[in-house]
Amino acid sequence: MKQDSLNSEILIIGTGIAGLTSAIYAAQSGFQVNLITKAKHIEDNSTWLAQGGIVYQEKEKDIDSLIRDILTAGDGLSLKESVQVLAKEGTKYINDLLIGKAGIEFTRCEDGSLDFTAEAAHSDRRIIHSTDATGKAIEKGLLKLVKKYKNVKIFRQHIALDFITPHHIKDQLAVYKDPEVYGCFVLDLTKTRVKKFYSKVTILATGGLGQVYKYTTNHPLSTGDGFAMAKRAKASIINMEYTQFHPTALYSQSRPLFLITEALRGEGAVLKTIDGKEFMKKYHSLASLAPRDVVAKSIHKEMLKNNQPYVLLDIGSYMEGDKIKKRFPTIYQTCRDRGIDITSRPIPVVPAFHFICGGIKVDLWGRTSLKRLFAVGEVSCTGAHGANRLASTSLLESLIWGAKSIEFINKNKHFFKFKIKEAIDWTTLKKEESDPAVLNKAWHALKDIMWNYVGLVRNTRRLQMALEELQDLSEMIEKIYISSRPDQNIIELRNGIQSALLVAQAAWENKKSRGTHYRVD
């Protein structure tokens, strides 16, 4: 039976801030866009969970200080050209899309001006926010806007399988062609049917890989799909060892862990041991406002030294109760629901995986090493974050490169001057259903390997064991994948393992501790 085929000028995979930004600017340019997400609800993504805020450089004279802060946080590995784009162009896109077209309501002072907050490693109060639910406000605003465009078709519960590349085309000479992408094979989860989404340009915006770790703040759908797809298509992928662990996630048995935004420390909260002693001053001159990698490693050391399962974050001793409730309503209520009144009691916190600084290598326009494929957001590596991301720059990076990818496409109409040949059909003869008990056990094994061997603290032995065990796990799951009917669980698990191997291999090869990559040997 001939498989369904859908055509568009631009295919966008992912519906967080990066994907939606690309979709909106593409729609405004008159392009026909297919926008897909594996989620049942389009807002199910990590953007929705983002709390703290987004960098907004109000005064041009302060751009240089922002550049310095980003470079310092990146620990000498940030690409200066990308950092300059981030610092110089961000405010333009915030004004145009977020505040202007989408009408997102950021928190304002009594006089109507934007309310600025501080976060760790920032030398100035330059972060705007929507109380402590900034990502949610941005996602809602962009979703409302994108739905107005009739030239954007949204496909929910559609999970990308693999890019359509020359070797999928019915052309015996395709083997001689340069790597490029003609769209994607996509599984419609509602009908268990594989479709071919052809496109002249594909933009990958699939987010991160947090679910390969036992403890993470990432959305449950962050399973590393984009990294694995890019690897299989032989795209250039770099800096995967730089995995950022957020210092302060609410200590809990629930998954994912609830993020406690860095903005609390920006407003004066202090990290303490369980017996109430401050400890960050002995690790960094900025104390509780030190860069994320420093704070996370310091907390880890204190937990090990004192044999404690968590440390405390005290905001109630430094901010009035009513102000806490107004400034951090989401955190206040979430903690209150779990029996913690943060106005009078410190919050138990632990580090958890939060963000990957590496990814698919892209240029200043989001172009990957594969023709016709762009990558934006966390799945990409622009070089701006280096070895450690500065707080509140991730939403900004996604916004900027989501927009700039479309700007480049607009200026290069040659993308659309070719005709795609029919691709081979995805093999659909597999009848066996994968065993959920086996997959569940494999998921637990993956998370334990990554947390224990490729976590905050690494050494040669741990990484060697990680590579060996991940390779065995990968071979087992690959056999199941080949023999099974495709479903979301096996697809995500396979992608997660392949993404984890990218991280572990990069960590093994890099013998030097830097930023979030910390080796003790």
Image: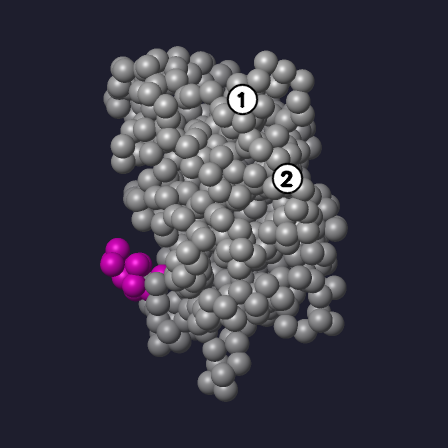
Colouring style: one colour
Secondary structure mostly seen in magenta is: helix
Q: Local crowd at mark 1 within 10 Å, few (<14), some, or many (≥20)? A: some
Please indicate whether residue 234 sits to the left or right of residue 148 in the image. right
| Quadrant where the N terminus is found in the figure | top left
Secondary structure category for the residue under label 1: loop
Q: Residue at x 58, y 23 (%)?
A: 166
Give x and y (percent) for residue 307: 42, 40
Residue at the (67%, 28%) spot, across then down = 511
Please state which amino acid type lies under the numbered disc 2.
Answer: Lys
440 or 368, which is in the foreground?
A: 368
Locate residue 373, reporting x and y percent.
59, 37
Which quarter of the image is occupied by the C terminus?
A: top right
Residue 23 visible, this angle: yes
Tell me the kind of residue under disc 1: Ile
Q: In this view, does 454 lie above or below 81?
A: above
Q: Name the residue located 68 percent from the left edge and 47 percent from the top edge.
A: 412
Q: In this view, does 210 lie to the left or right of 331?
A: right
CB under 8 Å between discs 2 and 1: no
Q: Nearer the viewer, mark 2 or mark 1?
A: 2
Bounds of the magenta span?
Answer: 331-341
Examine the structure image and report whether residue 334 is included in the region drawn in magenta: yes
Q: How crowded is mark 2: few (under 14 residues within 10 Å), some or many (20 or more)?
A: few
Q: Is residue 275 above or below residue 320?
A: above
- Farthest residue toward the bottom? 111
Residue 478: where, in percent of width, then height?
42, 16
| Quadrant hosting residue 136 | bottom left
Q: Earlier in the sequence, mark 2 or mark 1?
A: 1
Location of mark 1 (residue):
169
Q: At numbered mark 2, what does the secondary structure look like: helix, strand or loop? A: loop
Specify the label residue 417 is tagged with: 2
